[in-house]
Amino acid sequence: MTIMAESRPDLIEGCRLPVLLSNGEEWHMAEILSKKEVGGRNIFYIHYEDFNKRLDEWVSEDRMDIGRMELPRKDTKTPKKEGKAVNGTTSRSSSPDRELVNGSAQKQKALVARKRKTVEEDSEALILQPDGQPEPLPKIPRQTGSMVAHHDDIVTRMKNIEMIELGRYRIKPWYFSPYPQELTNVRIVYICEFCLKYLKSAKCLERHLMKCLLRHPPGNEIYRKDGVSFFEIDGRKNKTYAQNLCLLAKLFLDHKTLYYDTDPFLFYVLCEHDDKGYHIVGYFSKEKESTEDYNVACILTLPPYQRRGYGKLLIEFSYELSKFEGKTGSPEKPLSDLGLLSYRSYWSQTILDILLNLKPNEAGERPIITINEISEMTSIKKEDVISTLQHLNLINYYKGQYIITMSADQIESHSKAMAKKLITIDPKCLHWQPKDWSKRGKW
C-alpha cells in the first residue's frame, strides 16, 4: 500500500508569506522574488513589504511561516496603492514622516489659529517680511523616496553582487548594479580604490596595483583641509573613471540612473588622505548645464564613512560651489530616502543658524528678513527654504506678515546639533573657478 504524503503549494516566485527577520525578534510579510538550490536545499530571495530594498536577502525555509503563505495573484493588472506615473513609469512614494509638508490651506489655517494667541508673547519671534505684498506661501510639490523613477524588472530587483572589497573595507552592496555577468558568480568583487577598476580576484587586484599609477582620483584637487580633499572630475575627460564610479554608486543607490554617457556631468569626489594615498569617501555629480538650477544630480557617502558628518559635508560643498557661481541651487528631485533626510537636516541647521544670529534693529525691534535674503545668503533655492520652514512648523501668517516662532526646545536641539558638527567647509581653502559650459567647445 502506498501512503500519499500531504501535499502543499510549492514555494514559487510571487508567493507572499511571513518571514522571520534576521534579528530573530519578529515576523514580517515578504514576497519571494527568486529561488535557487545551494548544498542540496532551496533558499529564497525575498523582499520585505514596506521595507527598503537594501534589506532584501536570501533566506531558507526554516525562517518562513509556510502555513500562512499566499499564492501569487492571478490579476496582475491590479493598480498599485501608492505612487504616481512619471513619463510612463511608476515612482514609489516615501513614508509619511519623510514627505515634505504640502502647505494645504486647512492645515495652514489650523496652525495659525493655534499660535495666534501666543505669537505676540514669544520672545523668540522673528518677522519674515515678504518682498512686496504678503501672499500665500506656494505649495511645495510632494516628494517621493526614489532618485529616479524607473521600471522594476525581476533582474534589477535583486542584488547581483554579494560583496565588494574597496581598500581596507569589505562592504555588502544594497542594490543591483550592472557589473559584467562574470562578476556575479564570484564571492567578492575587488575594486581598486584609486582608479575604481573592478577585478574578480585578490591576485588580479595585486597585479593591478603594481601597474596602477593613480594614488588619487583623476582631475583637479580643488579643496584640501583637515585631512580631506575634493577632486573635480570631468565626465568627458575621465570617462572610464566616471563610469566605474557610477557602477560603484549604483550598488548603494536604488533609483540612480546609470549614465554611460558621462560627458554632460562633473563629479566631485571626497577623499581622506594619508601617506598611502587618497581614499574615496563619497561623491556627488552635477550637470555642466542645468536648466532647472540643479546643483546635485546624485550624491552618496559610502557605507563605511556614513554617520560621520561626510554626507552634510558633501551637501555643504555643493552649496559652496553655487555661492562661487552666484546662483541658488537645489538637488534633483525626487530624492532618495536617506538623501531627503540628509538634506532636510542640512537645510534646517543652516537656516536656523541664520535666524538665531539675526540682531534686533537700532530701535530694539524684532529682526526682519526676507525669504529671498535667506536664499541669497545660503544659495539654497527659495522653494527649499519655504519647505524647510514649513516642515519645522516655524512659519505663520499673522496680521499681514509671516512670523517665525521658535520654541526653547527647538533652539536647544539646534545648539546640540551644531555642537556635534565636527567638520565644515572652509571657503578660503576652495580653489576653484566656475566655467561657462554654455559654449560647447569647453566640453
Image: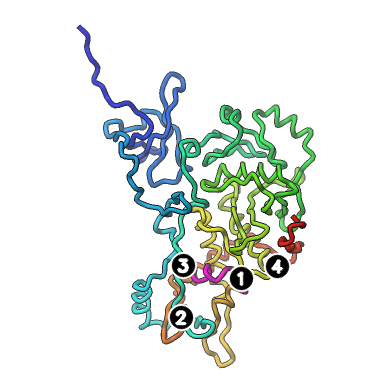
For the stretch drawn in magenta, the main secondary structure is helix
Report the Cα–Cα distance between label 3 and label 1: 19 Å
Q: Secondary structure at mark 2?
A: loop
Q: Is 226 drawn above or below residue 241 in the view shown?
A: below
Residue 386 lies, in percent from the top left, at 50, 71
Q: Is residue 320 left or right of residue 122?
A: right
Location of mark 1 (residue): 378
| Mark sitting earlier along the chain (4/3) | 3
Q: Which residues are magenta?
A: 376-388
Front one among 104 and 125: 104
Report the Cα–Cα distance between label 4 and label 3: 27 Å
Badge nearest the viewer, 3 or 1:
3
Badge nearest the viewer, 2 or 4:
2
Location of mark 4 (residue): 324
| Mark sitting earlier along the chain (4/1) | 4
Label 4 sits on what residue type? Answer: Phe
Badge 2: how crowded within 10 Å, few (<14), some, or many (20+)? few
What is the number of the mark on residue 140?
A: 3
For the question of whether residue 272 can be seen, the reply is no
Q: Are marks 4 and 1 in contact (CB under 8 Å)?
A: no
Badge nearest the viewer, 4 or 3:
3
| Mark sitting earlier along the chain (2/4) | 2
What is the number of the mark on residue 135?
A: 2
Label 3 sits on what residue type? Answer: Ile
